[in-house]
Image: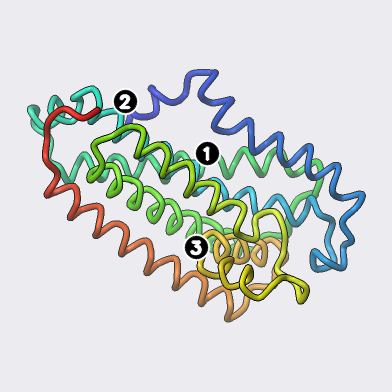
Amino acid sequence: MVRNFASNLDPLTAIIRFGQPAITIIVLGTMFSTIVSSDVTGGTSYTAFLVPGMVAFQMITGGVVSGNLFWLDRRWSMVEQVFSGPFLRSEYLGGLVLTSLLFSLVGVGIMMLVGLPFTGLPPLSPLGVGTVLLTVTFGSIFFAGFLIALGSRLRSANAYFSIQSFLQLFAIFLSTVYYPITSKTPKLLAAVFYINPLTYAANTIRDAFSGTLGPNDLFGLGVLALLAAGAFLVAAWAFGTMDLGPIQ
């Protein structure tokens, strides 16, 4: 984990990882708050709607970090070097998943600091704080496990990074991170939104911020927990059956 963080916390990488969503809050929050009615966003400003969505987005950031680390370790034969030492596959996999979680939590903290000047201090109760942390934990494990499993099966950098980029865009833009589902949302598009795990995460975190947690959020947490457990088990199986050797 120390190695993983050291390789991803140089200034340029940190700016790319955390600067882009922070700038999104500043720019979109400022511009869209003047044109998006609060009736659409549940009685709050668009910035107050956007910040919880960008907090949820950090789950993907953490998952992408771990997935890319694992892929590059395979590309440069670091996996074989790690396994030649006194390390188990389970320890290496656990380090990747914990790296994803910690990166996500760092991103959550940065999004909160950036969003506070626009939204004020959210009235988060202890239950709300726990809900946010639990949601981010489940989401990070899901995305990390999914990308690690994907990386263990593919042997082409073009294939891996193309699929990863497509899925990342799909998860972000076909979710409630940037916009809510309303009565005017096409039914087919709304159905796609509800297939997306990021929708459940964004909605749950948003309700935690507004203090309106309810049964729907408990259902969303249950969905994320099941997906996280399934993705981790698939990653563990793929990791255990992975063929070592050079990849392109």
Q: Residues within 10 Å of mark 3 (few under 14, many from 20)?
A: many
Front of the two marks 3 and 2: 3
Return the residue at label 1: 106
Closer to the chain start, of discs 1 and 2, is 2
SS class, disc 2: helix
Residue 206 percent location from the top left of the image: 67, 62
Which part of the image, by quadrant, shows the N terminus?
top left
Quadrant that contains the C terminus = top left
Left or right of 182 in this view: 158 = left
The mark nearer the N terminus, 3 or 2, is 2
Disc 1 is placed on an element classified as helix
Mark 2: amino acid = Arg
Q: Which mark is residue 3?
A: 2
For the residues carrying marks 3 and 1, which lies nearer the camera in this image?
Answer: 3
Residue at 35%, 47% in the rendered image: 147
What is the number of the mark on residue 186? Answer: none
- Residue underneath mark 3: 197
Q: Position of residue 244 (x, y in %)?
A: 12, 35
Q: Earlier in the sequence, mark 3 or mark 1?
A: 1
Residue 26 percent location from the top left of the image: 77, 38
Task: Tell me which residue sits at (61%, 49%) in the image.
Answer: 55
Q: How many marks?
A: 3
206 versus 216 height, above or below: above
Q: Which residue type carries mark 1?
A: Val
Could you tell me residue 85's position as x and y percent? 9, 27
Mark 3 residue type: Pro
Alpha-carbon span between mark 3 and mark 1: 21 Å
Residue 227 vs 56, above or below: the answer is below
